[in-house]
Amino acid sequence: MTAELIDGKAIAASVRADVTTAAAEVSEILGRSPTLATVLVGEDPASEVYIRNKHAACAEVGIESVHRSLSADIDEGELVALVESMSVDPEIDGILVQLPLPSGLDEDRVIGAISPDKDVDGLTTSNAGLLATGRPGLVPCTPAGVIEMLDRIGFELEGAEAVVIGRSQLVGRPLVSLLLQRNATVTVCHSRTRDLAATCRRADLVIAAVGVPGLVGPDFIKPGATVIDVGINRTEDGLVGDVEFEPVAEVAGAITPVPGGVGPMTIAMLLANTVSASRPRD
Ligand code: NAP
């Protein structure tokens, strides 16, 4: 392998160390710890693990967390009322509703009940609008983590040719806005893009957020380019990304592994967003 390995675990640990300092500062001002409320509806085992991991990560950096588990057959109005009550609770700074919700519950309506200044996942239309118009707000954790990672390895975004593969609300679109804010030249590709490999080969930075194992091969990569693999795919060989890691690492200048790349950054940015949401505003 010739590419430099971008160690997401180590970068996330340094973000968490900064968040620990910031959480202690805010605790002094508030007289209590920054507090994240999580809501889980139904009994999806993967979601239960994600929630447990988020609570453990909060505890490590000095963020208090509270949790509500609700039955999958909860009435939508009741769920919305719970989220609205958290939105006005002065002891709660951040709210995270674990997605996906069980079928029959309207995710847009439930997410819409989160106060935008407590929306630590950056999923409300209000925060999406602020991001799309280049104004400050809470930014979705995975795209924020990708930018933080690039900053911490010293990647110069200004003027760089960046190709983002994927245009989801959760990852691709917010990434495009963040890259534009940083003056990268951005191309966004998706399932109808005609020649994906040729488009990617122009790029100094390729970010894959697709969900197709091994989609990005070495023929997609300009020698020396930086490759960020957001994809998480469960296969018979375990967790893999959207990038064919070994052959691409022979061409790229720097590359993230899966696991151990973007994944740890996502949770670190959730913690950063929670502390940022807890800071008293003038
Ligand atoms: P998504 O909502 O399914 O979006 C996938 C995007 O990829 C869509 O825009 C789709 O195009 C595009 N696409 C699908 N097949 C393609 C192909 N063959 N060629 C080019 N583009 C193609 O997924 P997502 O929520 O953005 O997540 C993407 C991946 O990131 C998943 O593997 C997910 O598990 C992972 N993820 C990781 C983290 C993390 O913490 N590391 C966080 C979130 C997500 P169309 O728009 O045309 O359909």
Image (spheres, rainbow, N blue to C red):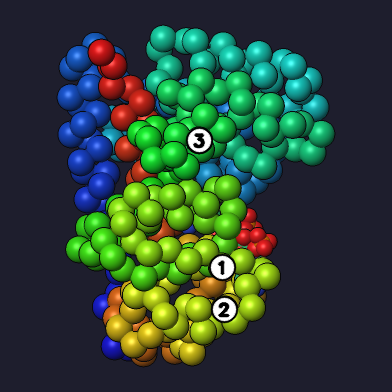
Q: CA distance from mark 2 to mark 3?
A: 28 Å
User: Dot 1: what SS?
Assistant: strand
Question: Residue 129, labelled with which disc?
Answer: 3
Q: CA distance from mark 2 to mark 1?
A: 7 Å
Where does label 1 land, which residue? 189
Where does label 2 land, which residue? 196
User: Which of the pair 22/69 is nearer the observer?
Assistant: 22
Where residue 258 appears, x then y in whole percent?
Answer: 45, 68
**How many dots with numbers?**
3
Please indicate, yes or no, whether residue 236 appears anywhere in the rendered image.
yes
Question: Residue 83, labelled with which disc?
Answer: none
Residues tagged 2 and 3 counted as in contact (Cβ below 8 A): no
Q: Quadrant of ligand 1?
A: bottom right
Q: Quadrant of the C terminus?
A: top left
Residues tagged 2 and 1 counted as in contact (Cβ below 8 A): yes
Q: Mark 3 or mark 1: which comes first in sequence?
A: 3
Q: Quadrant of the N terminus?
A: bottom left
User: Does residue 203 appear to the left or right of 240 in the view shown?
Assistant: left
Mark 1 residue CB less than 8 A from any atom of ligand 1:
yes
Where residue 66 appears, x then y in whole percent?
Answer: 47, 23
